[in-house]
Amino acid sequence: MTTATSRAYDHVKQAILDRAYPGGALLSEGEIATAVGVSRTPVREALLRLESEGLVRLYPKRGALVLPVSPQEISDVLETRELVETFTAGRATIGPELIGELTRLLEDMRRHADAGDGREFAYADRCFHRSLVAATGNEILTQLYDSLRDRQLRMARLTADDPVRAADAIRDHTEILEAVRSGDRRRIRAAIHRHLQTAGSALRGRS
C-alpha cells in the first residue's frame, strides 16, 4: 500500500471507529481526497480495503456508504469475546504484574470518564480485557482476540460517551479486578459474563 493510500486508509478508518463518519454516512472520494491532501486514486484504493473489512460498501459514481453496526455483529462479537475471555480467565497467570496492569487501566478508565473522553475510555476498556487474555501466554488466542479490535472499538464508541454506561462499565471492571485479586477463577468468569451481558444490552439499545 502506497504512503498516500495508507494516509487515506488511516484517516477514513479512524473517523469510522471514532464515529466522526457514523453508520449510514455517504462518503465522497473527492471530499476525502481534499481532507487528506491526496488524489482520488489512493482514496479509491483505501475504500476498497475498507470494504473488504466490512466497514463500507462502495456504490459506483455515488461514493462509499459507512455500514452501521448491526445487531447481528454485536451478538457475534460478544459471543466470540465471551468464549475467549471466560476460557482464558481459567488459564491466565495471576500475579502482581497482571493486577498492577489492570489497576492502572481501570484508573485510566475513571480518568477518561471524568474528562468525558469517550475515545480514550473505549481504548482503556479494550486494553483491560486484552491484558487478561494475554496473561495466558497463548499467542494464538491473543491474536484471535486482537482480530476483534476494530469491531470492539467501534462498538464501544456507541456507548462510551454515555456517562451512565461509563459508570456501569467502571463498576463491572472493578468487580472483574476484585475477582482477579481473589484468585477465584470461577468468580472471574462470572464477573466477565455479567459484564458482557450488561454491555450487550446497552449496545443493542444503541444499534
Image (cartoon, rainbow, N blue to C red):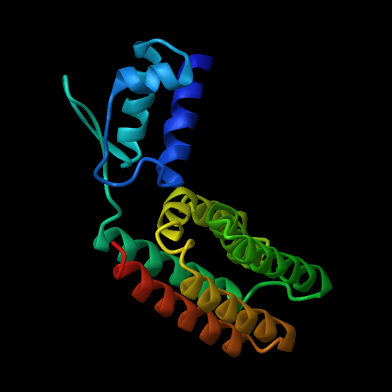
Q: Is residue 2 visible?
A: no
Task: Establish if 194 lies above or below 166.
Answer: below
Would residue 172 be visible to someone looking at this image?
A: yes
At a point 56% along the width and 54% down the height, the residue shown is: 140
Q: Position of residue 109 (x, y in %)?
A: 64, 65
Instruction: Name the quadrant containing residue 53.
Output: top left
Q: Quadrant of residue 183?
A: bottom right
The correct choice, above or below, for 100 with respect to 171 in the image is above
5 relative to 114, above or below: above
> For the view shown, which residue lies furthest in the front direction?
115
* Left or right of 134, for residue 191: left
* Residue under the image location 51 percent in, 57 percent down: 145
In the rendered image, the vertical position of residue 25 relative to residue 206, given as above or below:
above
User: Does residue 173 appear to the left or right of 194 in the view shown?
Assistant: right
Q: Can you say which quadrant of the picture contains the C terminus? A: bottom left
What is the total number of numbered labels drawn onto the structure image? 0
Return the x and y of residue 161 as percentages of the image width and height. 48, 61
Q: Nearer the viewer, residue 51 or 20?
A: 20
Residue occupying image coordinates x 81% and y 68%:
97
The residue sitting at the right extreme is 96
Residue 117: x percent and y percent? 58, 56
Q: Residue at x 38, y 23 (%)?
A: 32
What is the x, y in percent for residue 128? 63, 65
Depth order, front residue of 120/198: 120
